[in-house]
Amino acid sequence: MSVDPKNMAVHHGNADLVLSKKPVLVHWIVASNDSSSSRYADIHDGESTSAPKKLRIQINAKCCFAFGPPVPIYCSSGLYLNVEADSVRVTIGYEIVS
């Protein structure tokens, strides 16, 4: 699979956010959790938590998790990141597609 670097984006943060209103392919996600209890981060195919959930990452207490799916995750209606708590930091690499 060939990726055009001009279409790639990387986001790092710890807040809920619309990352794209265009279709995307999610290539990788790295998440960490500074909390003393387990937390999660979700990606949704759309612009809010009411959009279909494509993936939930559970991050154990004081831990990190890296995920690179064998095939990129296609979100046809945009990309929304939902972070359970501000103790969770997420870095996500995605490609904007036509």
Image: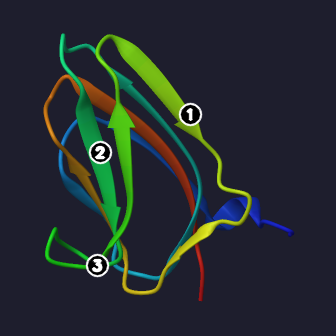
Residue type (three-letter) at the residue carrying disc 2: Ala
Image position of 10 with respect to 24: above or below: above
Amino acid type of the residue that numbered disc 3 sits on in the rendered structure: Pro
Residue 4 spot, x, y in % from top left? 77, 67
Front residue of 89/71: it is 71
Name the mark on residue 51.
Answer: none
Q: Give the quarter of the figure containing the N terminus.
A: bottom right
Sequence-first tag of 2 and 1: 2
83 sits to left or right of 27: left
* Residue occupying image coordinates x 31% and y 36%: 13
**In the rendered structure, are the residues bearing label 2 and label 1 in contact, judged by CB atoms less than 8 Å apart?**
no
- Residue 76 or residue 63, whichever sits in front: 63
Residue 52 is labelled as 3
Q: Amino acid at mark 1?
A: Ala
- Placement of the C terminus among the 4 image quadrants: bottom right
Lower sequence index among marks 3 and 1: 3
Determine whether, in the image, residue 1 is placed left or right of residue 37: right
The quadrant where residue 85 appears: top left
Side (left or right) of 64 relative to 82: right
What residue is pinned by disc 1?
66
Q: Residue at x 32, y 29 (%)?
A: 89
